[in-house]
Image (tube, rainbow, N blue to C red):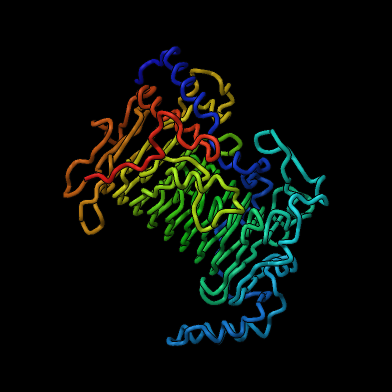
């Protein structure tokens, strides 16, 4: 049995942490969004779920609308033609060109109905008509609602239906006038480049918050293009049941590269994401399977040179495998920090057979801090300015998560730590998913339980070359059921850790309220602000550690 929690000890820890962390930036605070809900799977929706509730696949047949630019013919002629496959792609694009009726992707989306394909020929798509739409748009002033935290006013779903290009370069909305959160128009839409992903460039040049927004757009399939320069998200999938993002290069987003939120039955694959101010990929508010299933899969992703390679507040039910997270400030983060995110607390993600390495990008030094205090319009969009705080030099960090599995990964050359685990009190997010008071001092330790780290290779490269992490595993010692087994260092030697002795699997740790000194050591870091508090006193997160020897 776990030991009885002293109310005085609980109160002391919670107060210390809560006061420091309440200012934590998050998805919700960085850009307010409407209250969001998971796709509706009640009894009434069973037929609908069967129709639209699966990960969509690529379709090479069916009704199609073709989009091209004036120079598409020249670009098609310039495509490679050395192999039979290359010649077939070139010939197919010449046929598509004869069918082209649209110059802008958004125009084709507006003309599309469910189950249609939008074929995008080689070219640069700036979507000039969308850029002229105002944000906010007075025409949709009546379509505002309270934000997810119950504070300010933000666009409701109807805002994006009636003023689709106020915030979005390309907007796909699937729920009709009934706004019942079920897709009934433009469902199963496919938007695909017709040659190679570097043949189609969709660029916002910071003109809109989102380059592509798919909102209640069940069955959306996006593939085979490069996308860049959002002022918030390059690709944003919201309240959508069934999505697939494949063969996409995402770059230079001020915040997120590819983001899904309150969505289910999704697949990210064959994506390269880089130079994002927050994360390259973000499966936030993942589906609530509570360890019964994985509703979102991520595979063959290469996320690098972002502040975070992967992040996901309430990133539940996500399976990440055979991917690379490298050369970020931190490779992977999932958390239960922020209020207004459905699915709290975070649980049941699995990272397996990934490479997590060299996440030491020094993005918080004095020179970068000074540069990033300039207005966004004055900055080079290719220079990453962090929008979220993190411990530089960390491979994988779970900040308040339960039932997560970290198994069979290769984690090396992260100068602070290969993996970090610590808890987040219920009070900070304003939600405990139990109906109990979030201020109940005895109900604060509902995160950082039952996480397992099994058979990971720590501190050496795939070829066996030693390349150590600063510390393989760091844990604040809070929670129950956390365990570590089968992890090995270079040459089969033991891993390094703090504490030195880690509980083994499957039994794991007995319940503990944690090591108070460790909890306190993290507290001031959460008060970081890119404009007003770039170097919180007592925090070492933002100083890149020296390379371990």
Q: In this view, does 16 lie above or below 25?
A: above
Q: Residue at x 69, y 59 (%)?
A: 171
The spot of residue 248 in percent (x, y) is: 51, 64
Q: In this view, does 27 lie above or below 108?
A: above
The x, y position of residue 80, in whole percent, is 47, 84
Residue 296 showing in the rendered view: no
Res. 309 visible in picture: yes
Q: In which quarter of the image is the C terminus?
A: top left
Q: Which residue is drawn at 50% across and 32% down?
A: 527
Q: Give the side of residue 490 with respect to residue 85, left or right.
A: left
From what the image shows, is residue 49 above or below residue 3? below
Name which quarter of the figure residue 364 lies in. Answer: top left
**Residue drawn at (65%, 46%) of the image:** 40
Q: Judge whether 197 appears above or below 264 on screen.
A: below
Relative image position of residue 516 (x, y in whole percent): 37, 22
Q: Tell which of 62 and 78 is nearer to you.
A: 78
**Image position, residue 204 (x, y; %):** 63, 62
């Amino acid at each position: 049995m776990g030991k009885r929690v002293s109310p005085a000890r609980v109160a002391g820890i919670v107060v210390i942490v809560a006061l420091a962390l309440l200012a934590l930036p998050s998805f919700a605070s960085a850009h307010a969004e409407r209250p969001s809900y998971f796709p509706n799977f009640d009894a009434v929706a069973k037929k609908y779920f069967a129709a639209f509730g699966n990960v969509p696949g690529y379709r090479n047949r069916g009704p199609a609308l073709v989009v091209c630019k004036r120079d598409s013919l020249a670009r098609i002629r310039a495509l490679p033609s050395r192999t039979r496959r290359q010649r077939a792609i070139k010939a197919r694009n010449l046929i598509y060109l004869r069918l082209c009726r649209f110059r802008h992707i958004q125009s084709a989306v507006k003309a599309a109905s469910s189950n249609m394909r939008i074929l995008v020929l080689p070219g640069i798509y700036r979507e000039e008509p969308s850029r002229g739409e105002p944000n906010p748009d007075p025409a949709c002033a009546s379509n505002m609602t309270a934000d997810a935290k119950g504070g300010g006013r933000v666009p409701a779903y109807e805002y994006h239906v009636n003023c689709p290009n106020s915030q979005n370069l390309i907007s796909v909305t699937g729920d009709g006038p009934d706004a019942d959160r079920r897709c009934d128009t433009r469902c199963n839409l496919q938007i695909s480049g017709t040659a190679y992903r570097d043949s189609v460039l969709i660029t916002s040049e910071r003109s809109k918050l989102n380059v592509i927004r798919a909102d209640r757009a069940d069955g959306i399939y996006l593939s085979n293009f490069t996308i860049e320069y959002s002022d918030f998200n390059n690709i944003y999938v919201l309240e959508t049941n069934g999505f697939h993002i494949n063969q996409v290069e995402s770059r230079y987003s001020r915040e997120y590269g590819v983001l899904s939120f309150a969505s289910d039955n999704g697949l990210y694959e064959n994506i390269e994401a880089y130079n994002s101010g927050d994360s390259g990929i973000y499966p936030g508010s993942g589906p609530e399977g509570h360890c019964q299933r994985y509703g979102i899969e991520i595979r063959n992703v290469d996320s690098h040179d972002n502040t975070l390679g992967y992040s996901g507040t309430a990133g539940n039910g996500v399976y990440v495998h055979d991917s690379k997270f490298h050369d970020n400030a931190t490779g992977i983060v999932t958390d239960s920090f922020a209020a207004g995110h459905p699915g709290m607390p975070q649980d049941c993600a699995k990272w397996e057979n990934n490479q997590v390495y060299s996440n030491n990008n020094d993005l918080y030094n004095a020179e970068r801090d000074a540069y990033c205090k300039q207005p966004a319009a004055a900055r080079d969009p290719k220079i990453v300015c962090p929008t979220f705080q993190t411990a530089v030099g960390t491979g994988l960090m779970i900040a308040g998560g339960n039932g997560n599995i970290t198994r069979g990964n290769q984690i090396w050359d992260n100068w602070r730590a290969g993996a970090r685990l610590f808890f987040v009190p219920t009070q900070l997010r304003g939600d405990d998913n139990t109906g109990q008071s979030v201020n109940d001092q005895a109900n604060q330790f509902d995160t950082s339980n039952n996480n397992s780290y099994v058979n990971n290779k720590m501190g050496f490269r795939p070829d066996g070359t030693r390349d150590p992490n600063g510390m393989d595993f760091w844990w604040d010692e809070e929670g129950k059921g956390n365990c570590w087994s089968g992890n090995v260092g270079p040459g089969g030697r033991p891993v390094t850790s703090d504490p030195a002795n880690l509980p083994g699997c499957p039994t794991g740790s007995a319940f503990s309220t944690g090591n108070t000194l460790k909890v306190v050591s993290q507290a001031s870091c959460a008060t970081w602000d890119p404009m007003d508090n770039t170097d919180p006193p007592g925090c070492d997160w933002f100083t890149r550690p020296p390379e371990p020897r």
